[in-house]
């Protein structure tokens, strides 16, 4: 921020000041604020840091008229509850960090931990979640903007891939209701389809990625997982659940060394199931008791 710098309006100026104060760990307080002028100084008494801005009549723009950016206080005090922090300020800082480290799964808990460490302020889970939503909006556009792109995306998808069957259902006001698309042509490649799906906090399954390869092997799984890595990154909280194909195990160990790998075991024959169930119940009786409530036929 500097003298003669202009802002679209007073809110923009206050936002920039809040961002600066959060980054530089000081608090400011308002001396004068009305529709024509905005004057703030450092919250610590007798400190010489101050800023004065004026509206450029007849516009809404505000221009910095005087700015003393030097603190004579010992301003770098730790403010665990920083009063200028809000979702936009945190989201903007987060957006910059996310832009640099795109390949990372970042949960609100981690965001809260990292922002606490980075800014030395207390950010709880809820604040971190809101900041993440705002940062994602800055990165990807709002969900309204994304939905608005859906018709043209489907139109082009169909134009270039005649096998794809897309539908968008709208209501009487032409607003989005639901959509459907089937990737019919995938089967036509006569290869092996590789899928990655995720489970969210509500135990809902959502598709992440799919690919087609000539045949399932260590090489193809590694290639597929490397592409997945570019999207989600690696972290210790990440867990893979797969079947017992050895090719997958080795590929996960190579591409996602920090991730946990669990197995999903399938028994298609009754006698195989009984045998596995017997072994399972003797090692995990509590889990077996829980699962026993589910009808066997399921
Ligand atoms: Zn100061």
Image (cartoon, grey):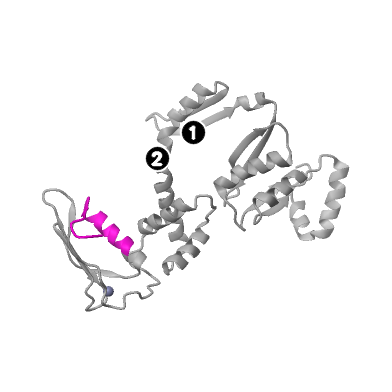
The residue located at (79%, 59%) in the rendering is 284
Q: Position of residue 280 (x, y in %)?
A: 82, 54
Asked if the beta carbon under badge 1 is closer than 8 A to the nearest atom of ligand 1, the reply is no
Q: Residue at x 83, y 51 (%)?
A: 277
What's the magenta region? 1-20
Whether 259 is drawn above or below 73: the answer is above
Residue on which disc 2 sits: 144
Answer whether residue 132 is visible to the viewer in this image.
Answer: yes
* Res 196 quadrant in image: top right
Disc on res. 178: 1
* Residue most extreme to the left: 57
Query: How many residues crowd around disc 2 within 10 Å: few (fewer than 14), some, or many (20 or more)?
Result: few
Q: Please, what secondary structure does the residue beneath circle 2 have?
A: helix
> Which of the labelled discs sits on residue 255, or is there none?
none
- For disc 1, the neighbor class at 10 Å (few under 14, some 14 to 19, many from 20) is few
> Ligand 1 is in which quadrant of the figure?
bottom left
Dot 1 lies on which element? strand
Residue 132 image offset from top left, x and y in percent: 45, 54
Q: Establish if 203 lies above or below 27.
A: above
């Amino acid at each position: 921020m500097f003298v003669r710098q202009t802002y679209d309006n007073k809110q923009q100026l206050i936002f920039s000041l809040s961002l600066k104060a959060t980054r530089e760990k000081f608090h400011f307080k308002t001396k004068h604020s009305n529709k024509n002028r905005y004057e703030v100084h450092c919250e610590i008494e007798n400190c010489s840091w101050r800023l004065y801005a004026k509206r450029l009549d007849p516009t809404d723009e505000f221009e910095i008229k005087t700015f003393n950016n030097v603190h004579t206080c010992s301003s770098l005090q730790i403010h665990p509850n920083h009063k200028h922090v809000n979702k936009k300020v945190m989201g903007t800082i987060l957006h910059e960090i996310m832009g640099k480290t795109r390949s990372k799964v970042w949960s609100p808990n981690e965001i809260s931990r990292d922002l606490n460490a980075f800014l030395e302020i207390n950010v709880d889970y809820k604040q971190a979640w809101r900041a993440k939503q705002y940062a994602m909006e800055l990165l990807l556009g709002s969900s309204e903007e994304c939905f608005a792109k859906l018709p043209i995306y489907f139109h082009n998808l169909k134009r270039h891939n005649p096998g794809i069957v897309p539908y968008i259902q709208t209501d009487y006001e032409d607003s989005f209701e639901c959509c459907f698309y089937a990737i019919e042509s995938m089967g036509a490649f006569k290869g092996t389809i590789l899928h990655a799906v995720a489970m969210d906090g509500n135990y809902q399954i959502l598709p992440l990625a799919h690919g087609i390869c000539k045949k399932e092997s260590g090489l193809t799984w590694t290639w597929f997982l490397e592409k997945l890595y570019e999207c989600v990154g690696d972290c210790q909280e990440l867990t893979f659940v797969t079947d017992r194909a050895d090719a997958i195990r080795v590929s996960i160990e190579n591409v996602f060394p920090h991730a946990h790998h669990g197995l999903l075991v399938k028994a298609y024959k009754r006698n195989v199931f009984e045998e596995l169930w017997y072994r399972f119940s003797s090692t995990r009786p509590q889990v077996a008791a829980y699962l026993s409530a589910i009808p066997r036929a399921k």
